[in-house]
Image (cartoon, helix red, strand yellow):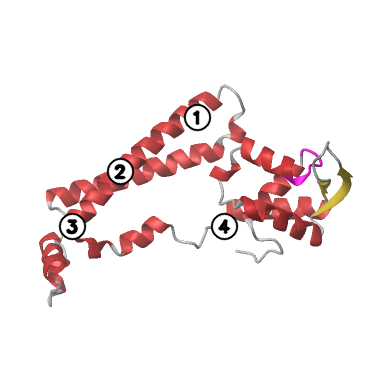
Amino acid sequence: MKRRKVGNLLGLAVLSVLIDGPKHPYEMATVIKQRGKQGDMPIKWGSLYTVVANLEKHGFIEAVESVKDGGRPERTVYRITPAGHEELEDWVRELVGTLDPEPPRFKAGLSMLGVLGPDQATRQLRLRLTELDERAAALRTSLQQLRALMPRLFLVEVEYDLAMVEAETRWVRGFLDELTSGAVPGTDAWRRWYETGEFPDDLGEFVEK
């Protein structure tokens, strides 16, 4: 991944909402929330003003005016610059066209699954499967409702999210079936290791015969 002058993904969200026209930071946050971007990327709202300042510092946005609304503090309105447009497009090209080297948290957990023992691992995977089923149902409902309101172009991230949830659900369900049926090689050795703390001398016990 390219090292960017402003690498916080909130910066990407800010640039995207400024395409519609100039906004002050409060308006930026409102539009980002309305578009559900906090569900598409990690966003820490406390860093908004720092991100806006950094985008301005590097020439991606510029102040156009300050406005006073009643008794509220003066607010600076920003617009995206040509350099900001170029940065936004380049950033999206990278995100779409480049594999993310950051492994998901679930993969990290699976890599340590042996410390739980087969029974506890099964319980936790069942809990995950329940959450996955609930998540998939919520996404399907959301897609059905949103398709009547907006073009598919603005829903592809929801389609992707649903596809990833469904794929993970299939894998977890299949692995669970193997665990509960004893089809995973070395399950008995795994259980003894978990209960006694003695790792088998012969790793062949974990290998499919």
Instruction: Give the residue at x 13% y 74%.
Output: 198
Q: SS class of the residue under badge 2?
A: helix
Q: Residues within 10 Å of mark 3 (few under 14, many from 20)?
A: many
Magenta-drawn stretch contains 169: no
Q: Is residue 170 shown to the viewer in this render?
A: no
Q: Position of residue 128 (x, y in %)?
A: 32, 46
Quadrant occupied by the N terminus: bottom right
> Which x, y percent locates residue 170?
31, 43
Would residue 83 be found to the left or right of residue 133 on screen? right
Residue 116 or residue 160, whichever sits in front: 116
In the image, 60 versus 171, the foreground residue is: 60
Label 1 or label 2, whichever comes before in sequence order: 2
Q: Is residue 203 above or below residue 2?
A: below
Residue type marked 4: Thr
* Picture residue at 20% right of the left edge, 55% below the top: 120
Amino acid type shown at disc 1: Leu
Amino acid type, callout 2 = Leu
